[in-house]
Image: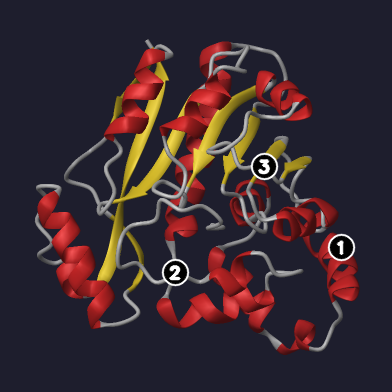
Amino acid sequence: MSRGLTHASPGKTRFDEIYDAPDPRAYFRRLAPLEYEIPHHAQEVFRHDRAARAAACGPGGPVTVLDLCCSYGINAALLNHHLTLAELYAHYTGPAVADLSTAELIAYDRAFYASRRRADASPVVGLDAARRAVGYALAVGLLDEAYAENLEHAPPSEPLRRAVARTGLITVTGGIGYITHRTFEALLGCARLPVWVSAFALRTVSYAPVGAALAAHGLVTVSDASRAYRQRLFTGPAERDSAIGQVLLAGHDPAGLEGAGRYHARLYQSRPR
């Protein structure tokens, strides 16, 4: 989601101007033409893994989810509400909210999300370097706790440590490559419950360093190499060519995937041995 760090894939277009705005309207307007869709694919995966984590570890209340690179709380919106990604695009690009101030939009969105809250909603902790984005998500009720911290460069604060200690599932859709194994090592060092991880990572980025860090904390990672999830259209030929080159270097075949004009991601799921 937000991209305040420095480990992005070479040649990948930057959208710095939309990742830390006061509200998500510019984010959705910019990404709609590129058909950014990975949160849609993650929605049912994260719901399934949350339920499986709860079942595996027995009674103890709802599973607390920590969403990395949470941005404006989009994954939390899709996890805990009767909403689709298409409906979020329509909501934030539509005329009903076009002329609202940010304060007015926050009030509007509090009611919007409250009316769509699922009965099985679980606490969500958001972590992102983009302070205004996480502030919005907290203000409208998508996040129960929000932390604007960069664990690539500094250890977690004490409040974040306490939040991680309550976490049962870590999720991420668009952040791998901007965050690295260092962020996961910092988080798992604070864990007190069995933690599962569900991560989508672009095929242009190696997940191996993250997988190794998770293994050092007793987590086994599985991924179906035959399954790819559409992320978004390329912004142009330069981004496409760069992505194809990186995919080939990683030993993947871009035919029908990056070669057809879109970034694609793989799903990595990690559980305790």
User: Can residue 250 be seen by looking at this rendering?
Assistant: yes
- Taking 146 as reference, is 110 left or right? right
Q: Earlier in the sequence, mark 3 or mark 1?
A: 1
Q: Secondary structure at mark 3?
A: loop
Q: Secondary structure at mark 2?
A: loop
Residue 200: percent from the left, percent from the top? 39, 46
Q: Where does the image place residue 207, in percent across and percent down from the top left?
A: 30, 38
- Viewer-nearest residue: 153 or 18: 153
What residue do we see at 67% from left, 59% from top? 72
Residue at screen point 90% across, 71% down: 103
Q: Amino acid at mark 2?
A: Tyr
**CA gap, disc 3 and disc 1:** 28 Å
Q: Position of residue 113 (x, y in %)?
A: 78, 59
Q: Which mark is residue 111?
A: 1
* Residue at image location 90% in from the left, 67% down from the top: 107
**Label 1 Cα crowd, 10 Å radius (few <14 / some 14-19 / many 20+):** few
Question: Measured along the vertical axis of the image, is residue 152 above or below residue 246?
Answer: above
| C-alpha span from label 2 to label 3 | 25 Å
Whole-angstrom CA distance, mark 2 to mark 1, is 26 Å
Q: Marks 2 and 1: which is nearer the front?
A: 2
For the residue pair 156 and 109, the one nearer the viewer reads as 156
> In front of the other: label 3 or label 1?
3
Q: Which residue is mark 3?
A: 149
Q: How many marks?
A: 3
Q: Position of residue 127 (x, y in %)?
A: 64, 42
Mark 2 lies on residue: 36
Q: Quadrant of residue 121?
A: top right
Q: Amino acid at mark 3?
A: Glu
Instruction: Determine crowd level at label 2: few under 14, some 14-19, many 20+ residues with C-alpha closer than 10 A.
Output: some
